Amino acid sequence: MDKLKEYYLSLGIDEKVYDYCSSMEDKLKERFDAIDKVAEQNQVKVIKAMQENRFAENHLHGSTGYGYTDEGRDTLEKIYADIFHTEDALVRQQITCGTHALTVALFGNLRPGDEILSVAGKVYDTLEGVIGVRPERGSLAEYGVTFKQVDLLPDGSWDYDGIKNAINEKTKLIEIQRSKGYDVRPTLSVAQIGDIIKFIKDIKSDVICMVDNCYGEFVDVIEPSDVGADMVVGSLIKNIGGGIAPIGGYICGTKECVANAATRLTTPGLGKEVGASMSATRQFAQGLFLAPTVTAAALKGAIFAANVYEGLGFKAVPNATEKRHDIIQAVELGTPELICAFCEGIQSAAPVDSYVTPVPWAMPGYDSEVIMAAGAFTSGSSIELSADAPLKEPYAVYFQGGLTYQHAKFGIMMSLQKIVDKNLIVW
Ligand SMILES: *Cc1c(COP(=O)(O)O)cnc(C)c1O
């Protein structure tokens, strides 16, 4: 028996589980090679931006207090702008999460009487509160900003007529959510996003096209800002923080959009000038440097998972062979027992908190119990290996991340092992 296999067996993986998973992995070499090529191009893109902006040792040290003339922070923002090919960028530790980044972008760029149009249907759950689709204290709705949405057509394509009809004199900002989040629609490709931006700009050229880029960064060699988006927004504890950023969010876009957002994040008059980086610049920069390969690892893990579970007869979304546009993998397991066993397996493979057993709980803001598995170095980081599932039909588990492919693979093997241990599948 080979040494690696022996090692896995000593970790509690059955021979049958190991052999089955290995046979699945063997089929994936070509796809993994293609992912490595994307990572290579993005790696070089990141390094080039760092070099061209003369990123330097003294930029790593950070500032305190007001943070005036924080060269490291300002240089990192230029690097982000170069990577996204935008005029400017706001990359800050004062942005607490992805929802906050989107909130800053929206509030900064909208005024009473303006309307938001979402062209890919329902927005991410937390954004519903921000916009006021779900009544919430301080929402945009309270400030007189209205909202419309046009769903994708049943086949996942744009509803061009619906979008054309929905655009009116009040329409100020188009919201395009790249990743499906917890929705059932497909994730959008960058090319698809480019198509709709062109269509919209032909109808109304001065409308702001904003892309919620969460989970999408570095999955492709281009970003939505390369195909016309005025603003791209995301979280640093997902792909682009590379697992190293402990907090933060970014907004890349036109000078005007970024200045408006910065004014909302800090104050009118101060904008981007203040906001101490403390010790974050080193972590943001190192995370950005690692992000292309970390994203590649997460993608490989997702594809491996889709193949393992589809091979056992479960529905994987995206399926085992389709092209990826984000790092999220859903698997419809169909029963609460399978969901819990899967999550136990992911947890037991973690570097942190591996000994705890995840259990479903009534988490605020959800309409059913939710189970979450994560043993992350950064709390809540979903570029690290994690899984979560609402305990309701169709009993789908959402799986994402893995700072290394090897860890993601181990997690998936453990998830299957727990299912086998509990006799939840027949094979
Ligand atoms: C994660 C996510 C968000 C919100 O990010 P948080 O950091 O959880 O606030 C918004 N949109 C999409 C599509 C996401 O995946």
Image (tube, rainbow, N blue to C red):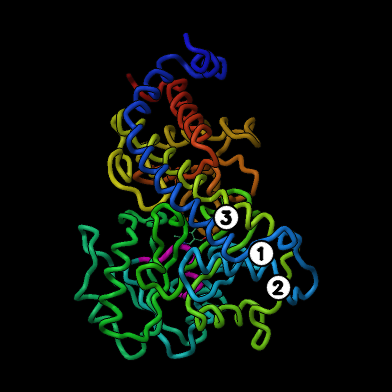
Asked if the residue at tag 3 contacts the one at tag 2, i.e. Cβ–Cβ closer than 8 Å, the answer is no
| Residue pictured at 42% horizontal, 42% vertical | 36
Q: Amino acid at mark 3?
A: Leu
**Could you tell me how far apart the alpha carbons at marks 1 and 3 are, in whole angstroms?**
14 Å
Q: Residues within 10 Å of mark 3 (few under 14, many from 20)?
A: many
Mark 1 or mark 2, which is nearer the start of the sequence?
1
Asked if the residue at tag 1 contacts the one at tag 2, i.e. Cβ–Cβ closer than 8 Å, the answer is yes
Q: Is any atom of residue 254 visible in this view? A: yes
Asked if the residue at tag 3 contacts the one at tag 1, i.e. Cβ–Cβ closer than 8 Å, the answer is no
Q: Is mark 2 within 8 Å of ligand 1?
A: no
Is residue 131 on the magenta stretch?
A: yes
Specify the quadrant of the image occupied by residue 303. Answer: top left
**Could you tell me how far apart the alpha carbons at marks 2 and 3 are, in whole angstroms?**
20 Å
Q: Amino acid at mark 1?
A: Gln
* Start-end of magenta stretch: 122-132
Is residue 190 on the magenta stretch?
A: no
Q: Which residue is mark 3?
A: 288
Instruction: Find residue 316 and report its horizontal and vertical position in percent.
Output: 32, 40
| Residue pictured at 40% horizontal, 66% vertical | 123
Instruction: Find residue 209 and report its horizontal and vertical position in percent.
Output: 39, 76
Mark 3 or mark 2, which is nearer the start of the sequence?
2
Label drawn at residue 275: 2
Q: Amino acid at mark 2?
A: Gly
From the viewer's side, name the closer residue of 204 and 425. 204
Mark 3 residue element: helix
Q: Which residue is mark 1?
A: 93
Mark 1 residue element: loop
Mark 3 or mark 1, which is nearer the start of the sequence?
1
Classify 335 as above or below 177. Answer: above
Specify the quadrant of the image occupied by residue 225. Answer: bottom left
